[in-house]
Amino acid sequence: MVDNNFTESFNSWILEARGKLILKMLEDIRIKVMNRLREKEEEARTWRCDFSPNCMKLYAAYLEVANLCTVHFNVETGYEVSEGGDRHTVNLVEKKCTCRSWQLTGLPCPHTIRALKYEKDDPMTEISWWHSKEAYLMTYRAKLMPLRGEKFWKAYLITARRGSSSSIHSKYSQELTYTIIRNYSSSDFVHKQ
């Protein structure tokens, strides 16, 4: 059993659909996902800057901390930057800081920001593309195609036998019947970009 925040969040998101029959449940989930993709894309289009609002909030907090940092030493490979009692080495060429925040998040840490300011470079240029509006929009670009209503679905009846007729216990063989509903007609799909 998997128990983590992602699955718990998803389970609470589909709570209403979980009590339904499987096809109805899947249809409800499909519609929720389809609407969520649209909402997220519309949200990203309202951003006033080239990076996500969460990224910019964290960047603003890092800027404040960076103003308290001091650059002590620099060599060809980077800088030694102190933050209170801590010291970190920043390598601008390899895009690394010993605090490892820059490598893990793609967002320049306060030490990196201070080193970049010392170099008279713009720290915003070092924010990873993955935080950009363009990347976010690409994430939500793919769409789930709308489907026609149930009355247009084709039903297929598949019968399978469990057990063998030559078996001594053939009277215990069970016949299982499954109805699979599929729509193989691509003309039923509407594609909008």
Image (cartoon, grey):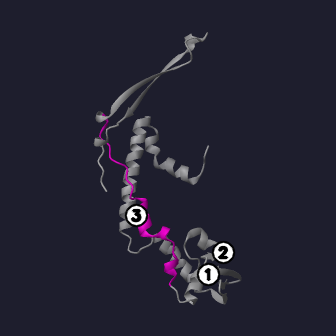
Q: Secondary structure at mark 1?
A: helix
- CA separation, marks 3 and 2? 30 Å
Check if mark 1's residue and mark 2's residue have beta carbons within 8 Å: yes
Left or right for 46, reference 108: left
- CA separation, marks 3 and 1? 30 Å
Q: Secondary structure at mark 3?
A: helix
Q: Is residue 93 depicted above or below 141 in this figure?
A: below
The residue beneath circle 1 is 111
Q: Quadrant of residue 109?
A: bottom right
Q: Is residue 156 depicted above or below 60 in this figure?
A: above
As shown in the figure, which amino acid type bears the numbered disc 1? His
Looking at the image, the residue that sits furthest to the right is 85
Magenta stretch, residue numbers: 122-150
The residue beneath circle 2 is 99
Check if mark 3's residue and mark 2's residue have beta carbons within 8 Å: no
As shown in the figure, which amino acid type bears the numbered disc 3? Leu
Q: Position of residue 188 (x, y in %)?
A: 29, 41
On residue 137, which mark appears?
3
N-terminal of the pair, mark 3 or mark 2, is: 2
Q: Quadrant of residue 105?
A: bottom right
Q: Position of residue 39 (x, y in %)?
A: 37, 58
